[in-house]
Amino acid sequence: MSNVRVLGKAPMDIASIFLWILGALAIAYQLFVSVLVLRSTFSSKGQKVAQILLIWIVPLLGAFIAHWVVHSTEEKALAIDRNFIREEHTHW
């Protein structure tokens, strides 16, 4: 049985179902990366707009690039914070 009937419509074959699932996963990943970009504290408003446009104009590849940019930016910021040594202030 290689056909599946969906909501009384024409049967869908396994390849069509697989493509629908891949499409849904791609959209979910793009939404996930869009939220990451919007929540990022290390990008300006203009950079965020450019990354969001990249995510949705160039599907998947744009999301991979934006995800890498957000990840590498936050990773560099955390490395800088780890090297920070706080001075102790004594209040008299």
Image: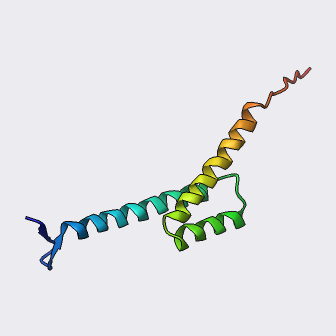
Residue 3 vertical placement versus 86 (above, below): below
Looking at the image, which residue sits at the far right? 92
Left-right relation of 30 to 71 = left
Name the quadrant of the N terminus: bottom left
Left-right relation of 12 to 20 = left
Looking at the image, which residue sits at the far left? 1
Left-right relation of 89 to 69 = right
Q: Quadrant of residue 37?
A: bottom right
Number of numbered labels in the structure image: 0
Name the quadrant of the C terminus: top right
Residue 34 vertical placement versus 8 (above, below): above
Residue 87 vertical placement versus 38 (above, below): above
Residue 26 lies, in percent from the top left, at: 41, 63
Q: How is the image coloured?
A: rainbow
Q: Residue at x 12, y 69 (%)?
A: 3
Residue 66 lies, in percent from the top left, at: 59, 59
**Between 48 and 21, the one nearer to me in the picture:** 21
Residue 76 lies, in percent from the top left, at: 70, 43
Q: Residue at x 61, y 48 (%)?
A: 71
Q: Residue at x 59, y 69 (%)?
A: 54
Residue 34 lies, in percent from the top left, at: 54, 61
Q: Quadrant of residue 4?
A: bottom left
